[in-house]
Amino acid sequence: NAGVTQTPKFRVLKTGQSMTLLCAQDMNHEYMYWYRQDPGMGLRLIHYSVGEGTTAKGEVPDGYNVSRLKKQNFLLGLESAAPSQTSVYFCASSYGLSNQPQHFGDGTRLSIL
Amino acid sequence: QKEVEQDPGPLSVPEGAIVSLNCTYSNSAFQYFMWYRQYSRKGPELLMYTYSSGNKEDGRFTAQVDKSSKYISLFIRDSQPSDSATYLCAMKVNNQGGKLIFGQGTELSVKP
């Protein structure tokens, strides 16, 4: 059972380039989330989805877009990368009820030069 | 002021010690409280999960929630070198799409 899988694991971009981070889960979870983790800041929610075809903004959504075309996949896009977006990005998923815990992938380490 | 405050450490203890990790929060609407453990270059993994106030025990780990003081704790008994990791507290309000608010994380090192 793979759980939550993130692709790629590492990436270096130049300022202004675009890229898409992929998250896939095999637990049939309704909810999916994208977080970023920066030193001294904990994890901060970027965007989330409560079901296929839905997305919503989190705490730090600016500069990112997301899509949830299939229930098992949640994509995070950077249209024009900036050095401030250098971070570790984590995807998580959970069942739809409020009392269900979130399960995390192992992250994508992104550096923007 | 952040909604959830956690001392980032680092915290270093000898093997076998009792470890106490703490978080304070300001939003009285939080109802679900979690502790995640994160090893280096890995994603957070759920360690403990409690609803409202009270204690919960799982092996060497005990989670406490005091809603009146807006304070949660994680105790680790008989700490082991394998417990060396970053511990993150997280909280959420009911019926808000499962959105979690995390503390900054406390880095723990257990020395043999």
Image: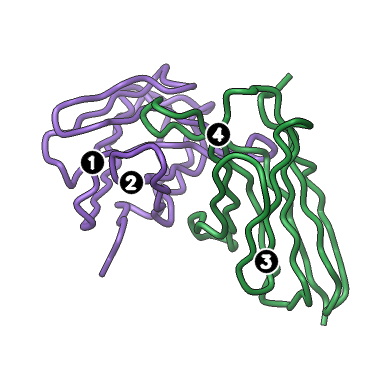
Chain colours: A purple, B green
Q: For the residue marked with disc 3, what is the amino acid? A: Phe
Label 1: few (<14), some (14–19) or many (≥20) C-alpha neighbours in 10 Å:
some
Q: Which secondary structure lies at badge 1?
A: loop
Q: For the residue marked with disc 4, what is the amino acid? A: Gln
Q: Which residue is mark 1?
A: A30
Residues at marks 2 and 3 on the same chain: no
Badge nearest the viewer, 1 or 4: 4
Residue at 67% across, 76% down: B82
Q: Is residue B9 above or below residue A46?
A: below
- Rendering coords of residue B2 (x, y %): 69, 23
Residues at marks 1 and 2 on the same chain: yes
Q: Which secondary structure lies at badge 2?
A: strand
Badge nearest the viewer, 3 or 1: 3
- Give the Cα separation between the discs numbered 1 and 2: 6 Å
- Give the Cα separation between the discs numbered 1 and 4: 21 Å
- Give the Cα separation between the discs numbered 3 and 1: 30 Å
Badge nearest the viewer, 4 or 2: 4
Q: Are marks 3 and 1 in contact (CB under 8 Å)?
A: no
Q: Which secondary structure lies at badge 4?
A: strand
Q: For the residue marked with disc 2, what is the amino acid? A: Ser
Q: Which residue is mark 3?
A: B61
Q: Is residue B82 left or right of residue A19?
A: right
Q: Are marks 1 and 2 in contact (CB under 8 Å)?
A: yes
Q: Are marks 2 and 3 in contact (CB under 8 Å)?
A: no
Q: Which residue is mark 2?
A: A94
Q: Is residue A81 above or below residue B17?
A: above
Q: For the residue marked with disc 1, what is the amino acid? A: Glu
Residue at 70% across, 30% down: B25
Q: Which residue is mark 4?
A: B31
Residue at 77% across, 52% down: B21
